[in-house]
Amino acid sequence: MYDIINYFVTNVKILQSIPFWMVQAAFMLAGCGAVLGVAALFAGVGSVVERNIAGRIQARYGPNRVGPWGWMQFLADGIKLVLKEDLIPDASAKMPFRLAPYFIFTVAFAAFIVVPFSQKLQIADLNIGILYIISVSSIVVIAILLAGWSSGNKWSLFGAMRSAAQIISYEVPVTITILAVIMMAGTMSMQEITAGQSGGIWRWFIFRYPLFTIPAFLVYYIASIAEVNRTPFDIPEAESELVAGYHTEYSSMRFAMFMMSEYVNVLAVSAIAVTMFLGGWQSPYPGHIFPGIWSNIEGLFWFFSKTFFLVFLMMWIRWTLPRYRVDQLMDLCWKVLLPVSFINLFGICAWMLLA
Amino acid sequence: MFDTEELVINMGPQHPSTHGVLRLVLKTDGEIVSEVVPYVGYLHRALEKIAERVTYIQFMPFTDRLDYLAAMNCNFAYAGAVEKLAGIEVPPRAQGLRVIFSELNRIASHLVFFGTCGLDLGAWTPLLYAFREREMVLELFEMTCGARLTYNYGRIGGVSFDIPPEFEKETLEFCDYFVPRIKEYNELLTGNRVFVHRTANVGVISQEQAKRYSLVGPNLRGSGIKFDLRKDEPYWGYEKYDFNVPVGAGEYGVVGDAWNRYWVRILEMTESVKIIRQALAQLPSGDIIAKVPKVFKPPVGEAYFRAESPRGETGFYIVSDGTQKPSRLRIRTGSFTGVSIIPEVGKGAMISDLVAIVGSMDIILPEIDR
C-alpha cells in the first residue's frame, strides 16, 4: 500500500500540496473501503454460488429466477432482509444484543487488512501480520458469546457455549500449524511469507517438507472449517438441534450481518490458507508472464483462483457430510488434530535442522 | 456464590427436528439430558370420535390423515378390519393390488425417513435424493388413483380403481431404477464415518426394553427381534411372496442402536422391491372389489385387524352395533410406542443424541395424536 501511495504522491503534483498524513489516511480509507466492498460482494455472490453448488450436488436447480441464472438472488435476499422488521426480543439484554452483529461483522472484515492480494495490493503489511490475524479471529468468540447470551433464549445460549468451546479449542491446532509456517518463512509478515514461496509450485510451503507440510495444511484446513462453524462442525448453529444457535433471535439486517460475516470468514480462512501454504499470489510456474506493474493482475488472478478453490471445497464438504456431535468434535480436536500438529511442528523443525 | 441448576428447555412443538409438533421437555445439565418428557396431543383431531359419527364407508378418507406418509397402508388396514368384522372376502386381484401399493408406500415412507434422518444429523443432501425417488412412487400412485398424498384408495372389500395399462411397465422400470439408488444412499450416508459416529451405540434399545414398551415394526426389528406381521400373521396373500425380514445385527455398534433402526429400514426397501416384482408377476385378473351393499351394515360384533405399516403395525379395533356407524373404533399405531420409549432411551444422552434417537424412531405425529 505504501508503494502505491508513494507512486501517486511522486507522480501526481496536486497531492504534494496536501500534508502527507492526509493523503495516507485517504488512501488507507479508500483501500479499506475497496476491501470491504470486495468482501461484502463475495458474501453476496458467495451465497448465490453456494446455493447453486448445493443445488447441483443435491440433484436440483439452485436459484435461477432473479436475474440471469439467478445471480441477482443475493440482492433480492438483501433487500428482503433490510425491509424486515428489526425485532429485539423483550427477554434480551438490549445493548449487547444490538452490538453483537456489528462486532462480528467488524472482526470478520478485520482479517483482510493484512491479506496480500497481490505484490502491491495489501492494506497494511504488518510485521506481525499472522499474529494479528490469530488475535482478530479470536475476537469472533466474544461476539458470538455476546449474541448468544444477550438473546435471552436458551437455544441461543447453547449455541454460544458450544461455539466458544469449539473456536477456542480449534485455535490451538491452528496456531501451532501457523507456528510451523512462521518457522519455515522466518517472518510473521504475510507479504514476506508469500515471497518466501516464490519460484513455482514446488516451492510452496505445502510441498516444502511434504511428509509434514501436507498434513499441516490438512490440519489447518480442517480446523479452519471448524473455526468458521461450517458442516461437519457447525454445531453452534446446528439447525436440527439448536434451531439456529446463537443467531436464533436475530432478524432483518442484523441477521444478514451474521450471514455475511459467515461468508466473509470463509473467504478469510481460505485466503490465509492460500497465503500460508499455497503460495499466496505466486503463480504455480516460476516468474511472471506480465511484466512490471501488470504482474499484479497475474497475482490477483492466482490468489483468487486458489482461494475460491478452497472456498468451493468447503461448500462441497458442507453439502456432503452430516454433523459431528459436540464431544466428538472435541475428541477430534484434542486427540487427533493437536497431536498431529505437534508432530508436524517437530518434524518440520527437525527437517529444517538436518537439511 | 455460584448456583448451578438444571436448565429446563422446551424442544418443540415448534422445533426443526421434532417431525411436526412433538414437544419434548428436557432437563439438561450442560449438553447432557437428564430427563426428557414427551408431550403429545398438539395434532389431536378426535379421529376415533369422528368415526362414531360417520358411516363405515365415509371413514375411509379419515384414515389417510393418520399417517400421511403411508396413507395406503392405513386405508388398507382399516378396510381389512371392516372386512374381518363383516366377513367379506377380498377378490385375489384386489389383494395383489393392496400388496403392491402397500409396498410402494412403504418405500416412499422409508425414503422420507432416510431423508429426515440425515437432515436431523445435519446432512441435507440425502433428503433431496430421497425425494427424487419418492416423486416417482407418487407418480405411480397419481396414475392409479389421482392423488399424491391422501389417496383414499382403499375400499371396503377391495380397492377403488384398477391399475392403468402402463402401470406395470412403469413400476418395473422404477424397481430397476431404484435398487442401484440404494447403493448410492449407502455410499452417501450409511457408511459415512460421521453418520456412524452419530448413530452407532446411540439410543440403544435392548430386546427386553423393546418388548416391554411393545415397540413394533422396524424399531422392534432394529433391536434384533424378528417379528413382522407380513410373515408371522400373513394377510392379503403375503405368504405367497418370498422375502426376508431384516433385523438389526449391530454391524457398527450394539444391536438396537439408532444405526440398526436406520439400517433395517434401508434393507426393507430392497425387500419391498422384491415383493412388488413378485406381486406384479403373480397379479391375477378379476374383480378389484367385492360386492358390498351401498348401505353397509356389518353384523353386531367386534374385530381387530392389524397390518404391517412402515412405522410398525397399524391396527383397527372396531365394535359394531349393527348400524351404519361404528359403535367404537380404536386405532393402534406404531409411532405411539416409539414416543413412549424416548424418556427411557433419552435419559443421559446428549441433546444431539436425542435428535438422532427421535430421528431414528421415524415417528409421525398425526399418527400419535389421531
Image: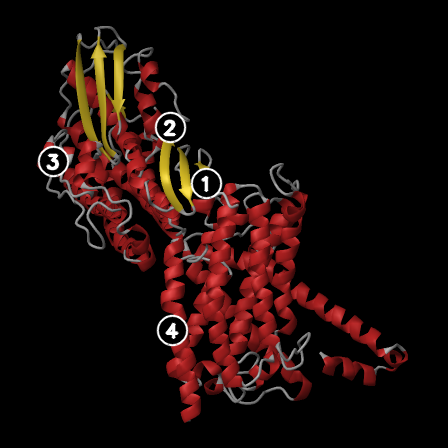
Type of the residue with mark 1: Glu
- The residue to which callout 1 is attached is B5
**CA separation, marks 2 and 1?**
27 Å
Task: Give x and y (percent) for residue A239.
Answer: 46, 47
| Residue density around tag 4, few if under 14, some if 14–19, many if 20 or more, within 10 Å | some
**Circle nearer the viewer, 4 or 3:** 4
Return the disc, 3 or 1, that comes first in the chain's sequence.
1
Q: Residue at x 32, y 28 (%)?
A: B367
* N-term mark: 2 or 1: 1
Label 2: few (<14), some (14–19) or many (≥20) C-alpha neighbours in 10 Å: some
Query: Along the horizontal axis of the image, is A14 left or right of A228?
Result: right
**Where residue B350 sits in the image (x, y, percent)?**
37, 47
Report, in whole angstroms, how far the alpha carbon at label 4 lies from the one at label 2.
48 Å
Circle 1 Cα neighbour tier, 10 Å, few/some/many (<14 / 14–19 / ≥20): few
Write down the chain letter for disc 4. Answer: A
Horizontal relation, residue A143 to residue B88: left or right: right
Q: Are marks 3 and 1 in contact (CB under 8 Å)?
A: no
Q: CA distance from mark 4 to mark 3?
A: 53 Å
